[in-house]
Amino acid sequence: KESVMGGDKFDCQEEIASEKSRAKRSAYEALKEERKKLPIYPFKDEFLQAVHDHQVLVIVGETGSGKTTQIPQYLHEAGYTKDGRMIACTQPRRVAAMSVAARVSQEMGVKLGHEVGYSIRFEDCTSEKTIVKYMTDGMLLREFLTQPELDSYSVVMVDEAHERTLSTDILFGLVKDVARARPDLKLLISSATLDAEKFSNYFDLAPIFKIPGRRYPVEIHYSKTAVSNYMDAAIVTTLQIHATQPPGDILVFLAGQEEIESVEENLKYQMRGLGTKLDELIICPIYANLPTELQARIFEPTPKGARKVVLATNIAETSLTIDGIKYVIDPGFFKMKCYNPRTGMESLLVTPISKASAMQRAGRSGRTGPGKCFRLYTAYSFQNDLDDNTTPEIQRTNLANVVLTLNSLGKRMAEFPLDPMLSKMIVASEKYKCSDEIISIAAMLSVGNSIFYRPRDKQVHADNARMNFHTGDVGDHIAHLKVFNSWKEANYSTQWCFENYVQVRSMKRARDIRDQLAGLLERVEIELTSNPNNLDAIRKSILSGFFPNSAKLQKDGTYRRFKHLQTVHIHPSSGMAEVIPRLVLYHELVLTTKEYMRQVTEIKPEWLLEIAPHCYDPKDVGDSSSKKMPRGCGLAL
Ligand code: ADP
Ligand code: MG
């Protein structure tokens, strides 16, 4: 028999456990009630009937009507996952896939990654149990490589179709074929805009299911005169709303992380200056690289007496719905990936939005009551300068990746979830026996430009720390390698990152990516070999992938790309900015105030001829502006 003592303890634990599960259940019940209030809810049965009757269905409903979060759940409840097949729902953006999956797992009362999961590049949060899978459109595209008929899915929902991202447009073609081959597969194309006819036409006149929206009037205010700096204007407008307008949260659209961080800092500073004169202003940024726990903050209800201001990229236009927004500030810009076939250059350009986007943005303020939208441009500009619609990405991008993906549905390179140039660099590292170093570099480059941080008050320290990795400098790629290896030697320590002004989160991500790449090397049977002291071998591997990205120093101190008349500059954040080598390769070009090369490494002219003789001519490469040949150049040029 149990002793009394033991019994007591047992009871007590049981009480705690049941208290926990009671709290969980009541949160779940509350969410269940909330779900019933969504515009899509009254149409649930009608919707399920339509899916039953038709193989392909186009769904139109305003942002926030419940398409993304509810439809997969309805289908699951209706038995579409009974045979263990999954429901896929694609999103153009990683953040949206993660955030929606988190929400739906809560609504279903399950752990994220179990029944409900997400899959984005370099991060697979799914398991054997997963039946509802949110994923980026790019990831579904990749899945075609391994399962051309998408056998593990019963339903594919291509969400946010109106965004017309490159991957989504390509998916259209592929899923259309699969639907013909697999009559049991249901295909849903969902869009937040009303021009759904073109989708319906493309899918052999598939029926359109409209979810009637609830909309409140939105008052539009234009700037009286052209705005010279829209970030400043956005800050002033935010503060004005906060000081003079009734309660309600503010949503500000900005073009990327840098703008968001700068506005955030500035707003905080201004609020501090105002002391207690104004109510609390809770500033919530949201962009792709923001840590997940901070992303969740935008959805937290605003406490009474305070006001929330969400600083968002285009993601808040249709992909994410934030409740409680009453005021929208729209500067009229977004960051668009553009490809110029003449220069072969892809760049992120801050570009004016379209009229359709401006309408969408304004609409975000009228979801739960009448709203106001402040456009930081003139009414004349809206009428005359903005295009009606944004050009679909497929018409303005570099199709190299797509061609590769489609072609490969067996090349080694396509195994790598990377850009073709990075993949080529990795494949080439086998020849130069430095695959170990190259995958570290590839991983670091894939993390992007968020390795180092530079706090305003410690810029000098941060810059010194960064330059430590540049001793004996040949370029930013090698510096990246040094950063990774030093962190590894420090046992991946957080303290080390802290001391060196390196972002822990970025480094962890680089480590994850590197692990994946190591796994992929094994799969394509490239041996992991290390050649740490042969910097030439490492640089030649990089050049094998990036040979189109080379530039030569001109007499005036600028650089010029080969075969292009384009003048480029070394980005000031590069360790090479002061070194000014004669010949360089770069990872990417970014257009800000000038055309900048980011991640720059010095190369030798004879390497270009050795690695890419089809692209480079001895007379171009050797046409030295200084007339002096670099030392060690063995070729007669
Ligand atoms: P749609 O896809 O039609 O734009 P959603 O299904 O994304 O609509 O959103 C429906 C509702 O779910 C939103 O109004 C919002 O209240 C809520 N919601 C969606 N995502 C989240 C989230 N990550 N956190 C909290 N609430 C969310
Ligand atoms: Mg949605």
Image (spheres, rainbow, N blue to C red):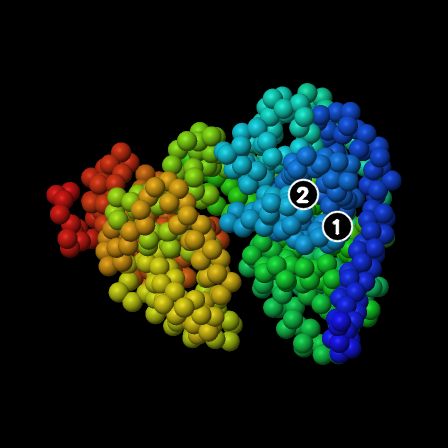
Q: Is residue 552 left or right of residue 182?
A: left
Classify 580 as above or below 159.
below
Query: How many angstroms separate mark 2 from mark 1 (CA)?
Result: 11 Å
Question: Is residue 567 or residue 570 the one in the foreground?
Answer: 570
Classify 474 as above or below 396.
below
Residue 94: percent from the left, percent from the top? Answer: 59, 48
Position of the N terminus, as image quadrant, is bottom right
**In the rendering, which numbered label is found on residue 108?**
1
Position of the C terminus, as image quadrant, is top left
Could you classify mark 2 by the number of other residues whose Cα lies within 10 Å: few (under 14), some (14-19), or many (20 or more)? many
Image quarter of residue 427: top left
Residue 228: in sight, yes or no? no
Classify 222 as above or below 169.
below
Q: Count the marks: how many?
A: 2
Residue name at image x 35 percent, y 56 percent: 477
Residue 617: percent from the left, percent from the top? Answer: 23, 37
Q: Is residue 579 left or right of residue 145?
A: left
Residue marked by disc 2: 132
Image quarter of residue 525: top left
